[in-house]
Image (spheres, helix red, strand yellow):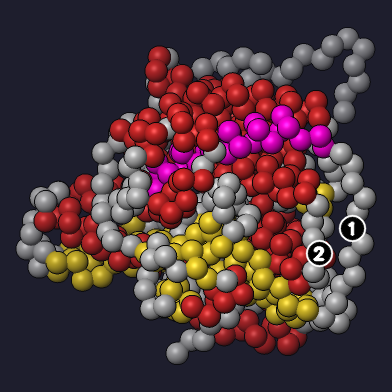
Amino acid sequence: MHKQSFDITIKNLSKIEGHTDLDVVVKDGKVTSAKLRIDENKRFFTTAAIGKPALGIHQVVSRICGTCSIAHLMCCIKCVENAFSVQPSEQTVKLRDLLLYGLNIRDHAMHLYLFCLPDIFGKDSVLDFADTGYEHDLVHKAFDVKGAGNDLCVLVGGRAVHSPFPQVGGFMKIPKKEDAKRIAKRLREIRGSAIEFVDIFLKKDFKFYSETMYISLRNDRFSYQDGDLTTSDGLCVGHANFRDHLQKFVVPYSQAPGFEFRGRPYVVGALARMNMNRDTLHRDTRRDLARALAVFPSDNIFHNNLAQAIEIVHCIDSSIELLEAMEFVEEPRLVIKPKKSEGIGVLEAPRGTLYYHLHIDDDGKIEFADLVIPTSQNQIKMDKDIGALVQDRMDKGMKKEDLPLEIEKLIRAYDPCMSCATHFLKVRWR
Amino acid sequence: MWAMGKKLRIGWFTFTCCEDSSIIFVEMMNRHFFEWKELLDFRHCKMLKSKNAFDQFDVAFVEGAISNDRDKAKLLEIRGKTKYLVAIGSCACTGGPSAQRNTFPEHLKVKIEPFLKKWDLYKDVLRLDQVVVVDDKVDGCPMVEQKFLAVLDKYLVEFGVKKAEAKLPGTKSG
């Protein structure tokens, strides 16, 4: 095995969001190449944005991604508000927190319970779980947690995908207090199940350690929508300067670019947030998940899934508190006067830091758009880790036939989103 | 509703799109998973399983638009293996938003041209019925859930997986 030469090719990887292929080349027992080819056809959203009104552009860019559309929508709105110096109301900020909590519950639950859970149980699919007993109950609980996140998104955003209610300056429609109480009750009912899933991901023994720099927003309430951009090296970067620290790379075999921060690969996402911000999680989450939280900080990329499972509980706890405390009052719509300007928007999408930069002309139309997507930021590290994982497993005597599943598990730990990663235009081919 | 042993053999495929309707499909499982598990044979559904069959389908649900020869060849292959093909979501039914570049002004078309060449992408993105016969359309961005359920129900009845719902006396059809 150690001195073998072979190729591993996985076409159209399953149980991830979007289309991607993988090629690994092994010569004389050494990995010589590992290439994750993000194969989602480009749709040129940053070009399509040009000439469109800034006040409505969030609904266009929402279509970059089905699963994390709410993150694109909210980041774009923040960016336009930054450009037009709009200050959203306290209630709007809370509603946005709720919408992002709902997104994270729904999105993490789909990824963890439908895509990753079968790996833990040695099954191909959630469809293969037993029709009775423990496995059956677990699938029920998975859909209940996911459904509660979906319902929270519908309550606040009007729909879980491409939500129609969020606007620049506020929300088109405010939830009713009685509906908020109903969702809070539902979240209380599924909280125990979400904790049960944390235990499952805590007990799984998938391991791949790789020293990494992490980047995420940091604030005092583990909110996904504001805070300082910080690195695990202790650097704090202003939103306006973030892009200056990034180097964008054309990945010749992939339809998506990669990024490095000051010349180093880095990782964004739940693991980054948990490594750096776990002290700001909701107090009930910290109280009930102390054993799982003791795992962090961690350089085991499989702990990204554990971090996602913990984030679901944090989002449930934070949402219950907001839903039960808020009054949900109608507010007058802000009058926003478009002007020639430039805006930056940054937030934490489920898969990591999302960055928007827009230039707006005198007529309030977009004249330039630049986006930095979580999956693109993780791509260079993910490629390196795939090669290193194959080498590590071969050195430990793993059979060649078992390597593809091992690679797939690693990629699902990273939780890439290919639709998001291929929106771009601004690169130069050589 | 009751299952009669037989299952509807379905495939779920995606091309150029944001997969929002696939997400809606998965979100609908919050309420329908156990019912669908009884009624549907998921022959091919990359979001849910790795071991997918690409043999014969009663109904293929196809999301996304067609951007290049590879997409086109795959769609033709799917058409050859399915009795019915249903276009899912806006990109499959109308081309857009993926087809928004079809109507770019000339100066933007010039900007994206090197990328079209580099990745062998068509000059214009195609909706599904520009490539194959489409039997049903579930439009919407993302797809409209009720319309999807109605189309699914229609094929469940047609293939004898489920009996038609009896109409209550006095109710009007349509």
Q: Is residue B85 above or below residue B119?
A: above
A396 horizontally vs A377: left or right = left
Q: Position of residue A30 (x, y in %)?
A: 14, 66
Relative side of A393 to A188, left or right: left
In this view, the residue in front, A87 or B43, is A87
Q: Give A28 or A298, whichever is nearer the viewer.
A: A298
**Residue B79 in view:** no
- Whether residue A363 is situated above or below residue A55 in the rendered picture: below
First to last magenta residue range: A304-328
* Secondary structure, magenta segment, majority class: helix
> Residue B115 location in percent, x, y?
56, 80
Question: x and y percent of residue A80 in the render?
Answer: 76, 67
Position in image of residue A346 (x %, y %): 62, 64
Image side of residue B113 versus residue A277, left or right: right
Q: Which residue is mark 1?
A: A334
Residue depicted at x 31% and y 54%:
A299
Question: Label 2 lies in what chain?
Answer: A
Pointer 2 residue: A86
**Marking on residue A355:** none
Q: Residue at x 26, y 52 (%)?
A: A208
Q: Are marks 1 and 2 in contact (CB under 8 Å)?
A: yes
Q: Is residue A155 above or below residue B159?
A: below
**Which class describes the residues within 10 Å of circle 2: few (<14), some (14-19), or many (20+)?**
some
Examine the rendered structure and indicate whether residue A261 appears above or below residue A3: below
Q: Is residue A316 magenta?
A: yes
| Residue B94 on the magenta span | no
Who is closer to the viewer here, A128 or A257? A257
Element under disc 2: loop
Task: Please name the residue shown 57% across and 39% down the image.
Answer: A315
